[in-house]
Amino acid sequence: MVRKPYIVGIGGTGRDNSSTELALRASLAHARRLGARTELFAGADLDLPMYTGQPPGEKAGRLIEAIRRSDGVLLASPGYHGSISGMVKNALDYVEELRGDERPYLEGRAVGSIVCAYGSQAIGTTIVAVRCIVHALRGWPTPAAAGINSVDLAFDEEGRCTNAAVQQQLELVARQVCEFGAMYVRMEPCAEMLG
């Protein structure tokens, strides 16, 4: 029996249930509907000490271990002044702790980007920033990203975005991360032949 892909969601803001966190939750919910196992790191989970290369504390260690086990990542950031938020960037800096792993950094993992901002310029530049960081960490950005004007975000009781076009973007990004994650899971028995 092939195991289900494990998708980690990272993002949001320092405020619980921010529009960015709700968008990430909606995308993760779709990943679960597709059969993935998921885990969310948002809000207080990302209130981490600045990364300095020192041994991580318990909270950061939990994030690192989740990323280490992951088959894919959904990454959500608000567009702060045209780029990724410091809180989300700091969480990604902890990926440095995976540098010596068999799969270092984000290698072999699809990373779907979700960006929420009040304005198209901030959305575009933040998506570019996220993708550049993902490339630097050896991850594979999905072809689609969800670029969302925060004014278009409202959610129903089930956590779906009431704007159908936005929900469709969130589902597409989740689907691409899940599909790639599932491909990686199926390839695991072949890893010895490739390595």
Image (spheres, grey):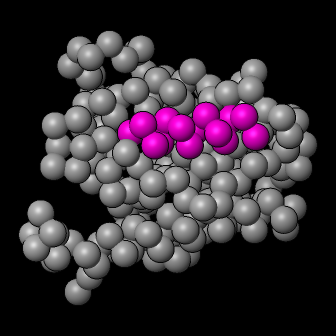
**Residue at image coords 83%, 49%:** 153
Placement of 81 over or under 84, stated as above or below: above
| 30 versus 140 height, above or below | below
Total numbered labels:
0
Q: Is residue 52 left or right of residue 81?
A: left
In this rendering, position of residue 15 left or right of residue 93: right
Q: Residue at x 50, y 64 (%)?
A: 177
Q: Is residue 71 magenta?
A: no
Q: Quadrant of the C terminus?
A: bottom left
Q: Where does residue 68 sit, x and y in percent of width and height? A: 27, 47
Q: Is residue 125 visible?
A: yes
Q: Position of residue 155 (x, y in %)?
A: 79, 56
- Determine if residue 62 is in view: no
Query: On the rendered structure, is 94 left or right of 132?
Result: left
**Residue 84: quarter of image:** top right
Point 84% across, 52% down: residue: 154
Quadrant showing the N terminus? bottom left
Residue 115 position by quadrant? top right
Where 153 sits versus 193, above or below? above
Q: Give the prevailing secondary structure in the magenta stretch.
A: helix
- Image coordinates of residue 130 in percent, x first then y, are 58, 38
What residue occupies the far bottom of the structure in this picture?
A: 1
Query: Which corner quadrant of the image does residue 140 belong to?
Result: bottom left
Q: Which residue occupies the foreground of this view, 176 or 44? A: 176
The percent coordinates of residue 89 (x first, y second) are 51, 27
Q: Residue at x 40, y 27 (%)?
A: 93
Task: Tell me which segment is drawn in magenta.
Answer: 124-137
Q: Is residue 132 magenta?
A: yes
Residue occupying the far front of the picture: 194
